[in-house]
Image (tube, rainbow, N blue to C red):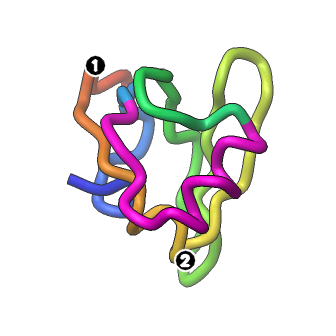
Amino acid sequence: MNLEDAPKKSILEIISINQEKLSADAMRFGIEPGECVRIINKLPGGPIVIQKNEQQIAIGRELAKAIVVKIVDHGKA
């Protein structure tokens, strides 16, 4: 599944980023395959806010669609 489709509050492992340009953008934020992130919030029609360690990052929908993830923990909704 991609980051956009993942449920809110879940902890996710990043598997891959499907577009080379977007992959470079994500890597600038430390978002790369093997990293774990948590979805903090999904703003309607806007970005998805994720947390990696203690840092929160707003990810645009285009980038979120390109990030392939798997659920590690469903978290507490």
> Which residue is at 77% across, 44% downward?
28
Question: Please, is residue 72 above or below residue 37 in the view?
Answer: above
Of the pair 25 and 45, the residue shown nearer to us: 25
Dividing the picture into quadrants, the one containing residue 73 is top left
The mark that comes first in sequence, 2 or 1, is 2
> Which residue is at 60% across, 67% downward?
21
Dividing the picture into quadrants, the one containing residue 67 is bottom left
Is the C terminus in the top left, top right, bottom left or bottom right quadrant? top left
Q: Are marks 2 and 1 in contact (CB under 8 Å)?
A: no
Residue 42 in the image, given as x and y percentages of width and height: 53, 60
19 magenta-colored: yes
Of the pair 22 and 52, the residue shown nearer to us: 22
> Which residue is at 65% across, 54% downward?
24
Residue 12 in the image, given as x and y percentages of width and height: 37, 30
Query: Dot 1: within a 10 Å radius of its alpha carbon, few (fewer than 14), some, or many (20 or more) residues?
Result: few
Residue 23 in the image, given as x and y percentages of width and height: 55, 54
Location of mark 2 (residue)? 44
Query: Dot 2: within a 10 Å radius of its alpha carbon, few (fewer than 14), some, or many (20 or more) residues?
Result: few
4 magenta-colored: no
Question: Please, is residue 70 above or below residue 8 in the view?
Answer: above
Kindly report the distance in space between the C-alpha atoms of the residues bearing marks 2 and 1.
23 Å
Residue 56 in the image, given as x and y percentages of width and height: 76, 37
Drawn side of residue 26 relative to residue 73, left or right:
right
Q: What is the magenta range?
A: 14-29
Nearer to us of marks 2 and 1 is: 1
In this view, the residue farthest toward the front is: 20
Element marked by disc 2 = loop
Element marked by disc 1 = strand
Q: Amino acid at mark 1?
A: Asp
Of the pair 60 and 33, the residue shown nearer to us: 33
Location of mark 1 (residue)? 73
Q: Amino acid at mark 2?
A: Pro
